[in-house]
Amino acid sequence: MHKIRIDIAHLIAGDFAAGAAMITFGAVLGKINLQQMFFLVWWEMIWYGLNEAICVNFFHVSDAGGSILVHTFGAYFGVACTYGFQPKRASNSINMQSSYQSEMVAVVGSIFLWMFWPSFNGGLSEGVTQHRIICNTVLGITGSVISAAATARILFGKLDMEIILNATLAGGVAVGSSCDLICEPWAAILIGMIGGILSSLGFAKIGPWIMESKVALQDTCGVHSLHGMPGVFAAIVSMIYLCTLEGKGFPADKFYFTDPSNYIEGAGTANEVQNAPGTYNDQAVAQLKSLLVTLAIAILSGLAGGFLCSMDCWKPIHSLFRDDDHFHHVLQKYPQHYLEICDEAIEYAKQAIYEIQAALIA
Amino acid sequence: MHKIRIDIAHLIAGDFAAGAAMITFGAVLGKINLQQMFFLVWWEMIWYGLNEAICVNFFHVSDAGGSILVHTFGAYFGVACTYGFQPKRASNSINMQSSYQSEMVAVVGSIFLWMFWPSFNGGLSEGVTQHRIICNTVLGITGSVISAAATARILFGKLDMEIILNATLAGGVAVGSSCDLICEPWAAILIGMIGGILSSLGFAKIGPWIMESKVALQDTCGVHSLHGMPGVFAAIVSMIYLCTLEGKGFPADKFYFTDPSNYIEGAGTANEVQNAPGTYNDQAVAQLKSLLVTLAIAILSGLAGGFLCSMDCWKPIHSLFRDDDHFHHVLQKYPQHYLEICDEAIEYAKQAIYEIQAALIA
Amino acid sequence: MHKIRIDIAHLIAGDFAAGAAMITFGAVLGKINLQQMFFLVWWEMIWYGLNEAICVNFFHVSDAGGSILVHTFGAYFGVACTYGFQPKRASNSINMQSSYQSEMVAVVGSIFLWMFWPSFNGGLSEGVTQHRIICNTVLGITGSVISAAATARILFGKLDMEIILNATLAGGVAVGSSCDLICEPWAAILIGMIGGILSSLGFAKIGPWIMESKVALQDTCGVHSLHGMPGVFAAIVSMIYLCTLEGKGFPADKFYFTDPSNYIEGAGTANEVQNAPGTYNDQAVAQLKSLLVTLAIAILSGLAGGFLCSMDCWKPIHSLFRDDDHFHHVLQKYPQHYLEICDEAIEYAKQAIYEIQAALIA
């Protein structure tokens, strides 16, 4: 009998998979009911596991923070799913808005994620590599905090809460595939800054433009901007970075992060990174293959999952972006203005006007 | 002179005691004033310390996560206390309700507890045992999250915020007495799931039925459902589990959690668990004795504490479940609807109607 | 070429500097715009770095938790700054008030700070010293929680949310300069309690009296009470404590915190604390010099920063304590009562009354 072993490393691998599912939820939340969510996660985990097995065991991808396997997969799977869930109606819904109180709680959540992101990226690494991952992740997120605030400021003349809360975290995604490789702090900061700019532009411009006007997709929490684009960017960065290493000893000659006594250990670690036999260029090709396979599996399985979930047998929800379809006793706790300004109230008012018009004509 | 040593282990032991006091607060909050709380905690700590001394030093209880010593003690002490504090009036109070905003903050608190529960259960252990505790606690809470959501869904057709926020944590209590013993992941998940179901039924059915209809007790936050019943269940589980170990080598033949090189260490740890000389069955008897003594001391000292606290010299609060009795400047910050719908407003309206009736008759 | 090394210790040193900047923000928030904040932090970091270099390298200050270098510096720099930012108008503003919802989120923040304060104070230490710091910080904050609640209760007859949320943390500041030295738990608790009392009196009495009536300063979040006074107190405590050690072996004869096997290591640690050659009295003098230099640099550079920032070229904000000057889309999310009761509404009403009066006279 084959026994499944469980230890903390396995639980962390499970957390990574749960991360992908939560990112997917960010795209579909408010548009599907509980049974659909349940089915969708079950469906996603099959393809997530398959993709991870291919990328890790066949391509030997180097993806310490899961930017390719978790963030890119979860985001593109989720966005592809939304094709099945009334995207046009969702884009026009007045229910999809945040409140002053929920944004205060969201600030707490963003600080949580900031704090624990270095542990997430470095959770499955050890020693000098873990130290490097933690430093690079902190520097990357610091870069994206600054660039996200600056981008919002330049675009709108003011800060924007949605961008501040989301795009600040994009730096953690952007360095996720190369955080165990980078030895120069400036590179981590620069990658984080570009990730922050990319994500901010995603929230402010690209998202509304691509998602809602051109194609029938609707991304509730903007996971394409926070996880999708920075995830793809992270994979590209890791390729470019690996190409620059070709022919150089890594990281002996420019290992800033620790004191000289670690240099030799660091070189040892580098050999371990290259667990696929071959050169740094071979590893860069492995990154590219992994990205393309991840995108292909995520988008195709996401479309299929969205299609399977959108069939009438699931009884799609009638009221978008509302908790009261799923939660008991929540309606009487809603703030008054949630009920006054909502799709249902507008629909009701329109109906009343039509009836009055009909009565006047008759 | 006998010096009291203080180190991190002692501070953690203090945190456990504070945990028991906080659980007790969950039962009495909103019904007693600050002086009564102060006295009650002082009184509780005497009996908590006595009970811990008896169970640890005489019975050699095995209770890594404190499910017997902390959760069961705190919950039954608190619930017994409430006999003294106007339970009937509290059960009928309209003030005891949560708001949309406070539930959002409560979600943050539940995530906090989820995250730090493995550290709480494993805080005083080391090495392989700590590793096993962390894995079992994570699996147990995962089980209770699923079963709590499912139970709410089956009972009400929708999720229920009170159950989701409370019963999801019951798995951490349910595995608390056996988390250092269990070697099979399925057992941890199953125990967590049963804990979650028990706790959900407690919130939804047993709590309202036992507490408010039959006996004069009122449990503000439902600690009997979250800590009391799962705590007793944890003790029973540890007994059953220990009985199944009798005659077997522990954990050599079925130790899933770590790689084979730890087997021998694991066996060493197991011997330490059995710090009372004797067999696994002896240990199961020790668990039973500890549970019974804990329940007896908690209920009797709780009743006594409630009686001592309910005497008129303490000036009992007149307005139930309101912060403005204890906090400065809070009244003008209350949302308007807190003031419109409250016991005082209803009382005032009733009084006004009586006066009008009296005037009409006269 | 001089390479700047970056490792976790450097990132923690950066966190300390960020801590000073955030404390400063607590004094100026709501009175300056984004560009002014940006300039102010840049300006502060120059003087923070200079002060740290002087105190650490020349005086060999012993300041594990940064009470002198971070808390005292940040608070006095910030308070001195406010001289330039319309302090009288700010003191009279009706906009400066907390809401019920924001205080609930602030409770979460306070619990965060409580939990991570021991790690902050001990982050750059190791071994027995780190253990001692963690125990002393926990005991210190425990002391200040109790004394802050008691002080509020004695002064007002009720607890006060502002004091509970702020002054409870003062114990962590108060033990910050001596937490690696103290070997008696009672000393840590006592220092924490005095810190809590000092901070509570600061919020309740000294702050309003000194700040708003006598001098043209206005401290938005009360950082002078939470960080300023307890920081100065921490420095004085470390001097007194070091003087009592003179001539005694440290900590061999009364080292409560760990078991006897650590005594010898502890003594070794003590020699490291005295990295300045000399006696304990010399170290006490170093603490005094560091405190005075820190106060001088903080106040002078703060006044200069406030002056530079208050020039008209920065376009000072017109609406105090409002987010909508800095954040996009926030105005329509404000709760209704924020807009009804604010400086602008009062100003508008006054203007309308003047116009009516003028019309009646004419």
Image (cartoon, coloured by chain):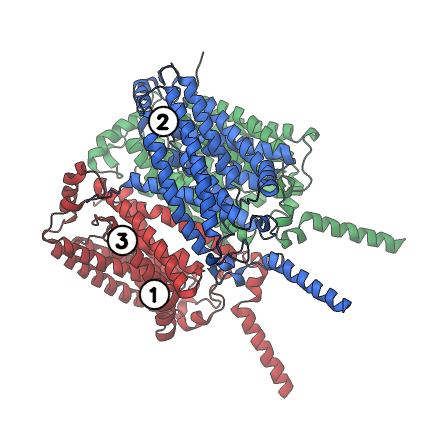
Chain colours: A blue, B red, C green
The mark nearer the N terminus, 1 or 3, is: 1
How many marks overall?
Answer: 3
Q: State left or right for residue A3 relative to residue A240.
A: left
Q: Farthest bottom residue?
A: B362
Determine which quarter of the picture holds residue B89. bottom left
Q: Farthest right residue?
A: C362
Separation of residues labelled 1 and 3 (CA atoms) = 22 Å
Measuring 28% from the left and 52% from the top, which residue is drawn there? B189
Callout in the foreground (1, 3) = 3
| Residue pointed to by mark 2 | C281
| Residue pointed to by mark 3 | B175
Coordinates of residue C204 in the picture (x, y in percent): 53, 48
Q: Farthest top residue?
A: C1
| Residue pointed to by mark 1 | B79
The chain letter for the residue carrying disc 3 is B
| Mark 2 residue element | helix
**Which amino acid type is marked by label 1?**
Val
Q: Is residue C316 visible?
A: yes
Asked if both marks, 3 and 2, belong to the same chain, the answer given is: no
Coordinates of residue A191 in the picture (x, y in percent): 49, 27
**Which amino acid type is marked by label 2?**
Asn
